[in-house]
Image (cartoon, rainbow, N blue to C red):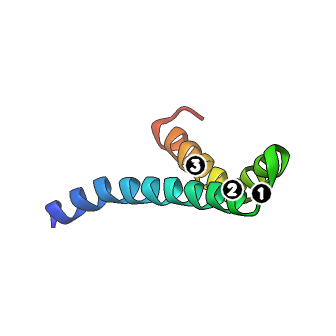
Amino acid sequence: MLQTQTFEAWITPLLIGGLILFMGFIIWDLAKKSQAGRFGTIMLFVVLGAGMMGYIFKVIITWLMESGGI
């Protein structure tokens, strides 16, 4: 039981981090294939990356609240 919890505690952030990196690659590839240009690429990362940033902020805020920082 303890091994399962330890495994989940380690693998979940790693897999989510990998997913975020993969999504970043997908956005970059989409911008490149559509010839979006510099401004279009920035907009794609801002708009499509907003959901990823929301998750990252959630993790940081949760960690701060649990550690007594907030």
How much space separates mark 2 and mark 1, taking CA atoms? 5 Å
User: Residue visible at 64% across and 54% down?
Assistant: 28
Q: Position of residue 34 (x, y in %)?
A: 75, 63
Q: Which residue is mark 2?
A: 32
Q: Nearer the viewer, mark 2 or mark 3?
A: 2
Q: Is residue 1 left or right of residue 36?
A: left
Q: Which mark is residue 53?
A: none
Residues at discs 2 and 1 in contact (Cβ within 8 Å) = yes
Where residue 38 sits, quadrant-wise, is: top right
Q: Say which amino acid is labelled 2.
A: Lys
Label 2: state its secondary structure. Answer: helix
Q: Identify the secondary structure beneath mark 3.
A: helix
Q: Pick the residue in front: 68 or 42.
A: 42
**CB within 8 Å, label 3 to label 1:** no
The residue identified by callout 3 is 56
Above-or-below relation of 3 to 40: below
Residue 35: give its label: 1
